[in-house]
Amino acid sequence: MDPKTSSLSLISLNVEGDKHWERIIPFFERESPDVLCLQEVFEPDYMMLCRRFAMHGIFRPVALRRSRYGEQGGLMPWGVCILARPPIVSSGGRYYFGDEGAPLWHFEKAEKPEINVNRMKKVFLWLTVDCFTIGTTHFTWSAHGAASDNQRRDAEALLRAIERTPGIIAGIAWCGDLNAPRGGEIFAKFAQKYRDHIPPRYTTSIDGALHRAGALERMMVDGLFSTPHYEVSDVALVGGLSDHMAIQATIRKTQG
C-alpha cells in the first residue's frame, strides 16, 4: 500500500485448483499486489501463498475436491481466500448458502453440475486493511450463463451477506467469479446495488486458450464492484494464467 496516495493494489483470480501455479506464481511475484482474492483454491495452496509472499488472510472451504495433496485419494478442502500484505485490521466470512458447520460436499466433475450446485457451500469473505474493506466470493454456477432459480436465491443471500459486513458504512469493494455474465439478470442485480468497474471494452473474462470449452464470448463472468466510497482505476484483465482471466486494479478512497 502506498501511504502517499493511500491506494491499494488488488488482483482477483479463479486459479482453477492446482493446475496453473507455474504461470500464476511468477505473475504474483512480478505484480506484488497488496491484496489477492482467489477462487477455486486448495487450502494447502493458500498456506503456501501466505508463506511465499509473507501475507496473511482468510480461507474458507466450499467443498472437497481431488488434488495432489493429502490422503484419502487426495481429497482436500477447496474454496475461497483473501490474502493481504498490509496489517489486517479485521476479517471474516459468512456462508450465504449451506451451513458453516455441515460436512463438505465431495465435488466430482463426473456428477451432474446441478448436483454440485445444490451441495456446494457459498461463502463471502472480507478483510479490512488500513481504511479499505475488500470482499470476494465464488458465486453459483448455471448452465451456459443463463439465470437460474438457484442463482436468484443465492444472489439475494449474497447481497444480504455483503450488507452485513462490519464497517460497510465506510465502504467496500468486492470481486470474484460470479458465474453470471454481464448483461444478464444476475449480474445486473449486483450492478444495481454496486458500481461495476470492469471496463466495457472487455466482453469476456474466460481465457479461451486455457478454458476447457475454448473461447467464450459475451461471458464477462468475473466482477469488481464497489460502493461510492472508493475510486477504482487501472482496471485490466490479464490472460495466460488460468481458465479465467485475472482482474487487476488500483483502489483509492474518494475525496470529500
Image: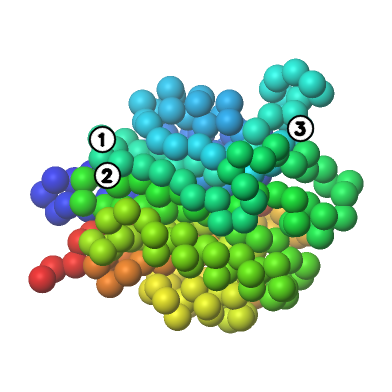
Residue type, label 2: Val
Residue 201 visible in the shown view: no
Residue type, label 1: Pro
Residue wearing tag 1: 87
User: Which of pointers 1 and 3 lies earlier in the amino acid sequence?
Assistant: 3
Q: Residue at x 70, y 49 (%)?
A: 120
Q: Secondary structure at mark 2?
A: strand
Residue wearing tag 2: 129
Q: Is residue 161 left or right of 69 when viewed as pictured?
A: left
Say which of 154 and 128 sits in front.
154
Where residue 225 appears, as percent x and y from the top left, is: 41, 66
Please determine whether, in this image, residue 154 is positioned above or below residue 106: below
The quadrant of the image that shows the N terminus is top left
Q: Residue at x 19, y 67 (%)?
A: 254
The quadrant of the image that shows the C terminus is bottom left
Q: Residues within 10 Å of mark 2 (few under 14, many from 20)?
A: some
Mark 1–mark 3 distance (CA, rounded to whole Å): 33 Å
Say which of 204 and 61 sits in front.
61
Please determine whether, in this image, residue 49 is positioned above or below residue 158: above
Q: Secondary structure at mark 3?
A: strand
For the image, the number of numbered tags is: 3
Residue wearing tag 3: 66
> Which image quarter: residue 186?
bottom right
Q: Is residue 102 left or right of 12 when viewed as pictured?
A: right
User: Which of pointers 1 and 2 lies earlier in the amino acid sequence?
Assistant: 1
